[in-house]
Structures are given as C-alpha cells and as structure tokens.
Image (cartoon, rainbow, N blue to C red):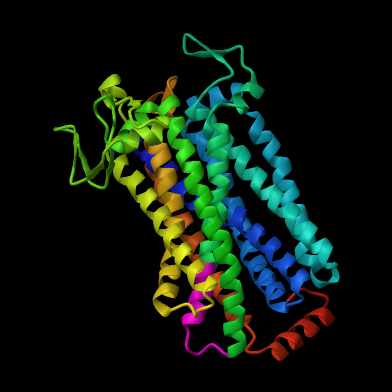
Amino acid sequence: MSHLMMARALFGITLGYHIGYATISVGAPMLIVIAEILAARTGQEEYRLFAKRVTMVLVLLVGVGLVTGTTVAVMLSVLWPGFMKTVGQVINLPFQIEVFAFMLESLFLAIYLYGGDRLSARARILSGALVSLGSGLSALLITDVNAFMNTPVGFQWTNGHVTNANPWRAMLNPAMPTELTHVLVSAYMTVGFLFAAMAAKGLLNRDSTPWQRAYYAKVLRFTMALGGVMAVATAVVGDASGKFLARYQPEKLAAAEGLFQTTKHAPLVIGGITDARTHQVVGGIAVPDLLSFLATGNFSGQVTGLDAFSQSTWPPLFVHVLFDGMVAIGSFAIAVGALYAIYLWRKKMTPRWLLWAIVVTGMLSMAGIEDGWIFAEIARQPWMIYGYLRVSQAVTAANGISWMFAGFLSLYTVLLAGTIWALRVYFRKHPLPSDGAQNDRIQVAAKKRGVSA
C-alpha cells in the first residue's frame, strides 16, 4: 500500500469509528426530549424509564466520542498538513465555535444526569433540549467544514496560496444548507430506527412479561415515528442534494449514476456495476428520463456526464455501488416505517416478520450512515478541496504512517470492544423491571440514594 493510500485508509477508519459514536450522540438527546415530553403529558413512567436508560447509553458514547473526535483532529494535523494550512486561513471559525457547542452539550448533560428526578419535568425537558441543541450544533459546525471542501468559497487562490480570505463567506458556502440538513435528519432517522430495533427485539422475546411488552410497544411507537418521519425527510433532502450535485459537483453525480455521456433525457440506472472499459453500467436497470428529472426538474433536462471532464479528475467508478446501497437502505427504511404505520393505524398487532424487519432496519440505518459518508468522500476524489487542492498535495511527507495505522486500529478496536462490554455490564446489572411495582421500588430506592436510576 502506498504512502498516500495508507494515510487515506488510516483517516477513513478513524472517521468511520467516530461517525458511529457521533451519530448516536446527536440523535439520542432528541429521543430523550421526546420521551420526557411524553412522560410529562401522559404521566406514564415507561417513557421516563426509557429516557433514563437512553441517557446511560449517551453518557458512555459521548465519552468515547470525545476520544475518537480528538483523534480525528490530531489526524487532520498529522496526516494532512497541506489541508490544515489552507482551512486554517479560510474556515477555521467552525472549529472554534464548536468548542462552545460542546460545552453547552456537556454542561446540560451533567445537569440532566445528576439532577435526575430532583429536577422538575420542565427542567428535565429544558436540559435535554439544550443537550440536543449543543450536540446538533457541534455536528453542524464540523459538517460545515466538509461542505466547504465540496464547494470552496470565501477566498482567492493565487499561485497555490490563499489570499483575501473571508471566513464568514466560507462558512455560508453553497453546500451548507443541504449537507447540514442531510446530516441532522439522517442522524435522527438512524437513532430512531436503532432504538426501535431494540424495542422490536424485546417484543420478539417470548420471555418478556406483559409489563415489559407494554413498555417495548410504547417505545416502538414513538421511535418508529421519529425514524419514519426522518427517513422521509432524508429522502426529500437527498433529492435536493442530487439537484445540488448537478449544479456544483457534476463529476460526483455522473460517477454516482454511471453517466459517461452528457445527455438529455438521461436515464436513472438502478443497480449494476460500472465498467470503466466499456463506459457502461453492467446489469443495471435503466429508468428512462428519470435522472434528468431528478437532477434538473425536467424530464428532458441535460445532465453533465464524465466525458465533460478530464479522466484524471474522475472519481472512482465504484461509487455507483455505494450510492445505490445508500438509496436502497433509505428506501427499505421508508417501506418498513410505512408498513408499521399501516398496522398501527388499523390497530392490528405488529406481526413477528415485521418486527424482524424493524430489527434489520436498525442495523441497516447505521450501515447507511457509514455508506453515505464513504460515498461523499470517495466521490470527491481526487480532490480534498474541490477544484483547488488534491489529496496527493495535502498529505504529509513524514514516514511512520504504517506504525500509526497499526496502533490506532488497535486503539479503536479496544474502544469498540470496551464500549460494547460496558453497555452489556450496565444493562445486565440494571435489567428492565418485570412489572410496574418493581419499577416503582427501584425509583424509590434511587431517590433515597439521591441518584437517577
């Protein structure tokens, strides 16, 4: 593996680990707020219990995410000094503001956690909302730097150097609205389906008591509502993102759709493998005119193909598979959410096959997040800052990346194993109560100890 590929692989693995933790850390506070509101409105303790259990997951993942997030920051400086030299002059502002967003999240997470039942319902809802605001702002600010990488503005490029930098203009780049919205709604979708999958698994367990089944059913309803609504929102924003790509990053769209020739009435090719030799998508199903409509809003609209660009700037053609995988996962999630809504509307018991489908959706939703980010980054190749700075120009010249690769891969593996172990130990020692009376006894004992159970 070349020096450049080793650096790319190390940073990709680092981001892959961090994105998993960060996604849950962004979405979980929203679930907590919704559960607290439902508990306050209905007086049903099951929602409060769910909020407490999710909080324990959030606290652990925020801690681990802090480690992986710090590692990402270190990797940017160590592996990509050429990139940091540029962004440090143009769009360093989001990194600075994000510190205050993280402080907001951490402060009110501590208040919510340690205040617990000693806080009023309104105070818990407010604290949870501020945690959600802080985590959301953190994600959006960091994502804004990525949006700048896709549509760099706010500076002039003179002989390979930055001049006349305007940090605010760089922050308000053209990719910001769609990319930031896409990140936020997809995080809420993923976390909704993840916890819905856990509730569905509980309902599939034939040993669950009637009280536990009632708890899981209530959790399933509102987590599926969040996941389903956000899945539709993700699709809507995804459509807007496609139109954005057609205008600002036509190479990425052409590679994603396997479109080699600039054409009107462009078909949307579903599935298949892009063949670089024949310039065709082998095994795909072509839907006439649909790509033109999705990209331009007109069935006869012209879509730019890869032939409009030098082959040296083409993204890797396998991104077509990544893009199809991301869309397939989103479509599957919407379908499962719609089926569940139909059964709920008809007041019919959710069948076991649909519960299993929900479990699968939870796992696929996280895979979809990772797939989406892999597609977004690889499809920008060979550029690190689109049109200005190539990845090969940004990489460090220092040796020793192979040792870093082995060391950090081991670290991430230990962190992942430790996270899973800690969650298993906690929930094994704090199992779901078998009935309402046991739950009441647990809460009373916790209040006497001055902690939140």
Q: In the rendered structure, does residue 206 fall within the stretch colored magenta? A: yes
Q: In the rendered structure, does residue 410 fall within the stretch colored magenta? A: no
**Which residue is pictured at 53% across the width and 72% down the height?**
344
**Which residue is pictured at 57% across the width and 55% down the height?**
188
Residue 76 visible, this orientation: yes
The front one of 132 and 447 is: 132
**Which residue is pictured at 50% across the width and 75% down the height?**
200
Q: Horizontally, is 371 left or right of 421 in the view? A: left
Q: Which quarter of the image is occupied by the C terminus?
A: bottom right
Predominant SS of the magenta segment: helix
Identify the magenta region.
196-209
Q: Is residue 223 above or below residue 407?
A: below
- Find residue 143 and report its horizontal and vertical position in percent: 56, 38
Residue 7 visible, this orientation: no
The residue furthest top is 159
- Find residue 20 and report its horizontal and vertical position in percent: 50, 54
The front one of 8 and 114 is: 114
- Find residue 400 and report its horizontal and vertical position in percent: 40, 38
Quarter residue 260 falls in: top left
The front one of 290 and 206 is: 290
- Find residue 263 and report its horizontal and vertical position in percent: 27, 25
Q: Is residue 269 above or below residue 88?
A: below
**Which residue is pictured at 51% across the width and 57% down the height?**
190
Q: Horizontally, is 12 left or right of 302 in the view? A: right
Q: Is residue 50 above or below residue 59?
A: below
Quarter residue 353 falls in: bottom left
Q: Which quarter of the image is occupied by the N terminus?
A: top left
Q: How many labels does the image show?
A: 0
Q: Is residue 179 above or below residue 220?
A: above
